[in-house]
Image (cartoon, helix red, strand yellow):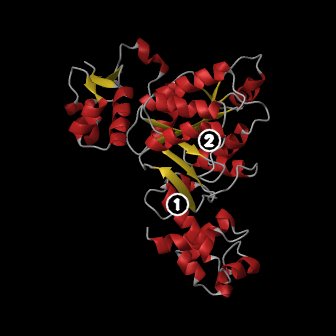
């Protein structure tokens, strides 16, 4: 997107009390932020939730220097500003009522990512951290992108697990993209950005204040197909994310813990209220994969007793699945070789391999190798 176009997006975002919903309404009414600034005051106030005061602030806006400084900071720090009209803007996020009009991105967002949010207590137990890292490592090995908030405890363990699985992970901040919180996560921040993405809706230098985090949480759930909670007290902030996820129509999962642990009370309450119990990654995948825009199949509990019966007929394979099967032989093949020989993007290959694995056509071996199952 051109620099002058981004200027208008940032300028409109800086209008006091406008908010994400008002911004969305203006976009729907006028088509672009530039057209909003060129609109008459009387036309502006005809838009739902746009008061006379907000309309005047738009018409009288003059702080273009601050907007240019923001663009300069993004260029200096290697940050991409992605707007709601850009092709790289997360498509699932556009489906929520109050989606952020723009995102600051360090790293790269992929439209074909299969995003699952994993969140929980900042005061995580050893068990909670261990289970989170194991679950997220396995999700990453299946080609799933792990989304979390880079907070202490479960969030940090989720990102570390995904990185250990050599997968992608997305951190959503409750601060400016240049404000790393907690500060001890600086190295983690850089590792996430190197292979995945760190994102925020907040301008540069925004401190991580309390009101920012509920706003941050709607993005965590909004870009994800489902939300997994590992350890949460009855008053945990993670339950705010769960409420937002339910409002957005997302799946909610919970990992059970010890009945003696205060950190299990929130997750156990979620299970009583209908959250899906998670014992392994397939408990998550069988719920969310039908939402992915390609044929996906989950492994039912009885599959291990049915002799590895295939879950769909070979005639029902997609062209992408046939291509990958033609590449893979009866000897183990590394994922990098499959990507190179198939000609597909890496995330597409991971998604197709996940489908084939869950359908019992291929088997994943240690070292991210794959082989056709006879």
User: Looking at the rendered structure, which numbered label has been put on residue 256?
Assistant: none
Where disc 1 sits, the SS reads helix
Where disc 2 sits, the SS reads loop
The residue wearing badge 1 is: 74
Q: Is residue 8 above or below residue 342?
A: below
What is the quadrant of residue 49 in the picture?
Answer: bottom right
Mark 1 to mark 2 CA distance (whole Å): 21 Å
Residue at point 72%, 76% (across, down): 54
Residues at discs 1 and 2 in contact (Cβ within 8 Å): no
The residue wearing badge 2 is: 149
Q: Name the foreground residue: 175 vs 352.
A: 175
Labels in figure, total: 2
Q: Name the foreground residue: 180 vs 31.
A: 180
What is the quadrant of residue 315 in the picture?
Answer: top left
Q: Is residue 34 above or below residue 243?
A: below
Q: Position of residue 165 (x, y in %)?
A: 45, 28
Residue at point 37%, 37% (across, down): 351
Residue at point 65%, 19% (across, down): 127
Quadrant containing the N terminus in the rendered view: bottom left
Residue at point 58%, 63% (across, down): 101
């Amino acid at each position: 997107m051109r620099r002058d176009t981004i200027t208008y997006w940032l300028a409109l975002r800086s209008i006091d009390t406008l908010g994400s919903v008002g911004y969305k309404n203006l976009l729907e009414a006028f088509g672009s932020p530039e057209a909003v600034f060129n609109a008459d005051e009387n036309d502006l106030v005809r838009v739902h939730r746009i008061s006379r005061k907000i309309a005047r602030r738009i018409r009288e806006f003059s702080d273009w220097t601050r907007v240019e400084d923001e663009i300069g900071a993004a260029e200096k720090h290697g940050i991409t500003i992605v707007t709601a009209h850009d092709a790289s803007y997360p498509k699932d996020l556009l489906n929520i009522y109050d989606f952020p009009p723009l995102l600051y991105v360090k790293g790269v967002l992929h439209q074909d990512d299969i995003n699952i949010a994993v969140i929980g207590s900042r005061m995580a137990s050893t068990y909670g951290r261990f289970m989170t890292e194991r679950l997220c490592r396995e999700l990453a090995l299946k080609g799933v992108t792990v989304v979390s908030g880079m907070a202490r405890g479960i969030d940090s363990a989720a990102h570390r697990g995904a990185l250990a699985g050599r997968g992608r992970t997305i951190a959503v901040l409750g601060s400016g993209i240049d404000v790393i919180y907690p500060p001890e996560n600086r190295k983690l921040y850089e590792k996430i950005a190197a292979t995945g993405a760190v994102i925020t809706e907040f301008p540069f230098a925004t401190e991580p204040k309390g009101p920012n985090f509920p706003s941050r949480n709607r993005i965590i759930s909004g870009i994800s197909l489902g939300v997994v909670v590992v350890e949460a007290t009855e008053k945990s902030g993670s339950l705010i994310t769960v409420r937002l996820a339910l409002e957005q129509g997302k799946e909610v999962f919970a990992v059970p813990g010890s009945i003696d642990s205060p950190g299990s009370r929130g997750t156990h309450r979620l299970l009583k209220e209908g959250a899906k119990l998670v014992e392994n990654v397939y408990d998550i995948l069988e719920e969310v994969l039908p939402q992915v825009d390609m044929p996906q199949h989950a492994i039912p509990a009885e599959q291990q007793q049915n002799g590895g019966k295939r879950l769909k007929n070979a005639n029902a394979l997609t062209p992408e699945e046939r291509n990958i099967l033609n590449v893979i032989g009866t000897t183990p093949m590394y994922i990098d070789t499959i990507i190179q020989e198939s000609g597909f993007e890496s995330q597409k290959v991971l998604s197709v391999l996940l489908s084939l694995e869950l359908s019992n056509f291929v088997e994943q071996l240690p070292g991210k190798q794959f082989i056709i199952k006879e």
